Amino acid sequence: MEEADTHPKSRSTCICPIHCIVPPHILEKIAQRGNADQKSWAFRTLALSEQIRGRRQSFGLIAALATASTGTKRRTVYDARSGRSLPGRLVRSEGGPRSKDPAVNEAYLGSGTTYDLYYKVFGRNSIDERGMRLDATVHYGRNYDNAFWNGQQMVYGDGDGELFNRFTIAIDVIGHELTHGVTEYEAGLEYQDQPGALNESFSDVFGSLVKQYRRRQSAKNADWLIGKGLLASGVKGKALRSMKAPGTAYDDDLLGKDPQPGHMNDYLKTHDDNGGVHINSGIPNRAFYETAIRLGGYAWQKAGQIWYVTLRDKLRPTSQFKDAAKATTVAAKELYGAGSLEVKAVQQGWAEVGIKV
């Protein structure tokens, strides 16, 4: 395979079409501002993400064969041992003993909690609704600053230790990436512009719900941060994104400032990042947060149900923010009745970000 072009000017679009948790605008900042070592692994991370893109279509066909009966959880964790060959050496299977390696145990637990949320709360039989096996590879590459879903499995880098910690450390990141698989099998939201931002937002929504479900946190008590714990000590920031207050997750000399808007008035029109899919996702993220807060209790019980039905039944590959607002309103009416508090909460949630239904 030819080496991908790592010149920053060549990366205006399609840098990370395999659904990486760290947005390209952060990696580009590191590539521009970092020291020699930081620039090197930032370029390498960007290049690896682009190389993997070409393998993704065939992965979906392979994954369709890895199915099991309803309610059968099957997790496998592999170790790439700092290499790039997937899946790597098998180190833990379903029901197997705990490993001495925390990354292995975190990947195992995170995929299991994600499976449980989808199965026990939403009645979904794994990622593809057919009992798909949940595979994961840890210790991918050297200083690889990302985690991604490639259409067949999860892949986690160890981070560089200076800016990012290991990527299994945040369970919401695991839920986020696995939800990209759910989206592929359901709405199929195109990874560009507003459909792409919705794609990212639904992953943030269910990634956050995985964390809240694991911790049994109410909407009021949740932190609504995506990737808390990923940023290494010394980095000025709390997480990669904030659903409660988009644009406030980090402000660091090297990583830059969190660019996410939380209202349509600040929607960013750009050709970078596939039309700003990681940036403008802050708008629907906040709409979900506002809805969940208004409904109270556990966010997965009502707000999560509405968003899940919307993702499963209502959206299309080219759906826009306005379409999502209308679809979640329709889903709320079907689930809870016209004029219900749930419908009003959904409408108010979208109104808070400048979208009226």
Image: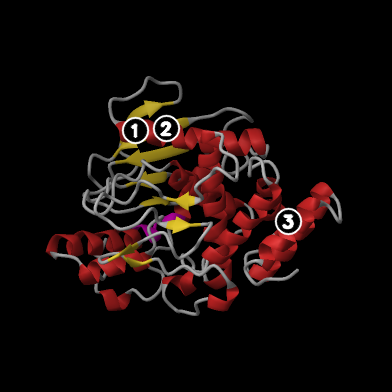
Q: Is residue 30 above or below residue 342?
A: below
Q: Residue at x 71, y 50 (%)?
A: 306
Horizontally, is 143 left or right of 102 in the view?
left
Spot occupied by residue 174 in the image (x, y as percentages of width and height)? 45, 44
| Farthest right residue in view | 338
Left or right position of 157 against 116: left
Q: Position of residue 161 (x, y in %)?
A: 22, 48
Q: Which mark is residue 104?
A: 1
Residue sitting at x 41%, y 59%: 249
Q: Quadrant of the N terminus?
A: bottom left
Q: Please tell me whether mark 3 or mark 1 is closer to you in this view.
A: 3
* Residue in view at x 54 percent, y 29 percent: 73
Which mark's residue is nearer the viewer, 2 or 3?
A: 3
Q: Earlier in the sequence, mark 2 or mark 3?
A: 2
Q: Position of residue 244 (x, y in %)?
A: 53, 57
Q: Residues within 10 Å of mark 3 (few under 14, many from 20)?
A: many
Relative depth, front residue between 10 and 152:
10
Q: Which residues are magenta?
A: 52-56
What's under tag 2, amino acid-wise? Tyr
Secondary structure mostly seen in the magenta stretch: helix
Which residue lies under the disc numbered 3? 345
Q: Using the rendered image of the protein, determine whether residue 238 is visible from the camera's viewpoint.
A: yes
Between 263 and 192, the one nearer to me in the picture = 263
Secondary structure at badge 2 equals helix
- Cβ–Cβ below 8 Å for labels 1 and 2? yes
